[in-house]
Image: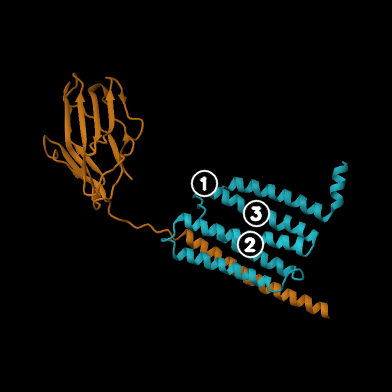
Amino acid sequence: MEIRNILSKKSAKLLVLLLINMLIVTVSAAMYYSLSMTSTIDVYAAEVYFKEGTDNGTSGLVVMLGGQNTTAVITGLRAYPNASLTYTDPIRVRNNASAGTYAQLRLVPVTNPSGNADQFVYIKFMLNATTAEYKWLNYTSDGSTWTNPTGATSWTVTGIDGGEEWPIVIYTMANATATATSSVTIEITVDVD
Amino acid sequence: MASPILPEFFALLSVDLFALLSMLTCLLEEKFPKAISYIYVMGALMGFGHLWVSREFLIFFGDYMRFLYSVLYLAIALANVVAVNLYLAISKKSWTLAKAWSVVVTFPTLFISIFFVYNYGHLQGAAFPLLMLQLVLAGSVVILGTSISVILSPALLKKLRRR
């Protein structure tokens, strides 16, 4: 009888502990699961965006900015046969944050020239950082094929300060024998860190 | 995509260890002070509180700090596992029980904990290394099974040696 009592006492204690522990372990696991779900991401307007440069509207050059100014299409860029042409300020990258808030930038090739390699000599894009941290994406042609950038440029070191605007300079040159109707399309992105 | 390991995973592991200790000390209550099972329940409950605080202050605590206090809690849980093992061996002189405890509880818990801490440290924020985990667990089970067989039947080891 005594042994039975002890056994039942121990069993009852074990059962109580089991239930309590199961409860603690379950709610802890649920808490951990909710922790992994807690990360919240809020949507903010982009601090770094495109802006038309002073070349916009001159000689048929048109900069069309997309929604939130985070995309831009430049049309009307010209390339003269056997003569280089420089657009010093067709489009800008603006950091709209407060002064002292730096953003690092780099140029990244997305879509290589669509064709007409025999019509062009080069098309170059340069991120004209005011601190002389120039970042180049050069597309050059040997008269038959394009030589394209193999990857992104390096990141800027100091970066663009809040309130600053950096132009993307575009250099073009067509082949001496190029025909007037030839065109090429290139797509690049500006990465922001 | 598999979820990455959060630093609080170690706190969750510690809660499980305290719950395990609570149950085992209850099963072997004649070897331990009566209150010890409830103390370990409190330890597990503290782990829950730990997770709660972590969730509420998630924005303020950095990853490194969360990792440090979670690993500290895990270290306390593991220290308790080892301490119980030593208590059985030294204070109670229950060698067989201490050996069984080391094989069934101490070794697997230390092994699993070290495995996860190492992986977290090595690949911070990486997904659970499922294949490696399975291999390690399979190895652990083999070692565990062999050890238990040898402890329960020491004659088996002699037989194996003769062969």
Residue tagged by mark 2?
B17
Cα separation, mark 3 vs mark 1, equals 20 Å
* Labels 2 and 1 in the same subunit: yes
Give the residue drawn at x 73%, y 49%. B143
Q: Is label 2 in a helix, a strand or a loop?
A: helix
Give the residue drawn at x 24%, y 29%. A123
What amino acid is labelled 2 in the image?
Leu
Seen in the picture, residue A87 relative to A103 is either above or below; the reply is above
Disc 1 sits on a residue from what chain?
B
What amino acid is labelled 1 in the image?
Leu
Residue A180 in view (yes/no) = no
Residue B110 is marked as 3
Cα separation, mark 2 vs mark 1, equals 24 Å
Cα separation, mark 2 vs mark 3, equals 11 Å
Disc 3 sits on a residue from what chain?
B
Disc 2 sits on a residue from what chain?
B
